Image: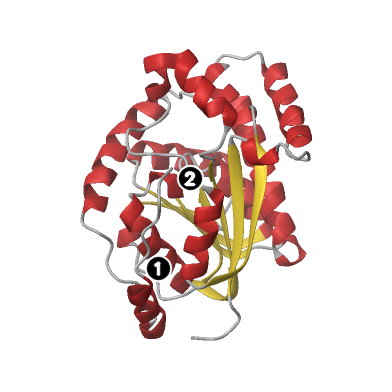
Amino acid sequence: MLSLEIDSTNLMDARKDHEAPPPPPEVRAVEEAERAFFAGYYAERRYNPTGWRLRMERDARVLRAAAPDGRLGRVLSVGCGDGEFELMLAPYAESVLGVDISPEAIAIARRGQERSGATNVEFRCLSVMDLTVDDRFDTVICVAFLHHLPVAALPYFLAATRERLKPGGLLYAQDPNVHGVLRHLGRRLMGRDYDKYHSRDERELDPAEMVSALSAAGFTDIAVRYIDLTLIPSLYVLLHGPDVLLRVCAIIDRLWCATPLAPWASGFSLVARRDSTPG
């Protein structure tokens, strides 16, 4: 289990000065490795498209349920990947800005945008560390992103994210669970094939530690929800279907996560807010 070492003094100074401290230097090395991994990931499309969409639909339901009246306002999506989730959210948002370091992912996202005709969505190929914006957002989304950050960079990223939110703004994140029972089994069964679907720098996260990190970064109203048991692992294992099994997995997940066994799910989501105090 990884422990998050949070420099609370720096975070307090960052909140006071309205800007986050610079990220640790190892972030850039990790980004280069991630960029190389995802070049192959998207070129080979290493996931079942039906399972992928079912996963996105589930995240969209959870996110909209947490948003005021289901409306998302101005949205920033960090690590947007192929853009499918952002296009799914477009009807419920004033605008959506998706950023990702993978040019292959952004190319796919832009083609999807052209097909959809969505006019309130923009995709940019750049690191969120290099994103400069004057305006703040109502919603920041990090789907399957936080677990790619180096441990030392996570507190700094959360502090910067808080500053990008308007007072009362919403953060939504979804990541793998370090306590997920099927993840340990998957590593044993898949052997080296496991690394085809997981970059070398990613790791599972501990929900309790994430709550502490969000609190230290100045977030409030933090809620954990377990959302996945079989669907996310299956969209890689069942790469070529049959699709009906992916739909069955989605039903199994909903049932499992409604029981006391939920903390051993494969994935979890986090909802948190920036407090309503201006500045």
The label number, if any, that marks residue 127 in the structure image? none
| Residue ID at (25%, 59%) | 24
To which residue does mark 2 refer? 205
| Residue ID at (75%, 36%) | 254
| Badge 2 or badge 1: first in the primary sequence | 1
Q: Is residue 149 above or below residue 249?
A: below
Give the quadrant of the N terminus: top left
- Res. 263 image quadrant: top right
- Left or right position of 178 against 251: left
| Residue ID at (70%, 60%) | 66
What's the amino acid at mark 2?
Leu
For discs 2 and 1, the disc positioned in front in the rendered view: 2
- Res. 130 image quadrant: bottom left
User: Can residue 20 be seen in this snapshot?
Assistant: yes
User: In this orientation, which residue lies closer to the viewer: 188 or 20?
Assistant: 188
Q: Where residue 121 sits: x, y (%)? A: 53, 55
Question: How crowded is the residue under tag 1: few (<14 C-alpha within 10 Å), some, or many (20+)?
Answer: many
Label 2, label 1: how many angstroms apart (C-alpha)? 20 Å
Q: Is residue 30 above or below residue 36?
A: below
What's the amino acid at mark 1?
Ala
Q: Where residue 267 sits: x, y (%)? A: 58, 39
User: Can residue 141 be seen in this snapshot?
Assistant: no
The label number, if any, that marks residue 160 in the structure image? 1
Q: How many marks?
A: 2
Q: Is residue 238 above or below residue 13?
A: above
Question: How crowded is the residue under tag 2: few (<14 C-alpha within 10 Å), some, or many (20+)?
Answer: many
Q: Where residue 160 sits: x, y (%)? A: 40, 68
Q: Is residue 36 above or below residue 17?
A: above
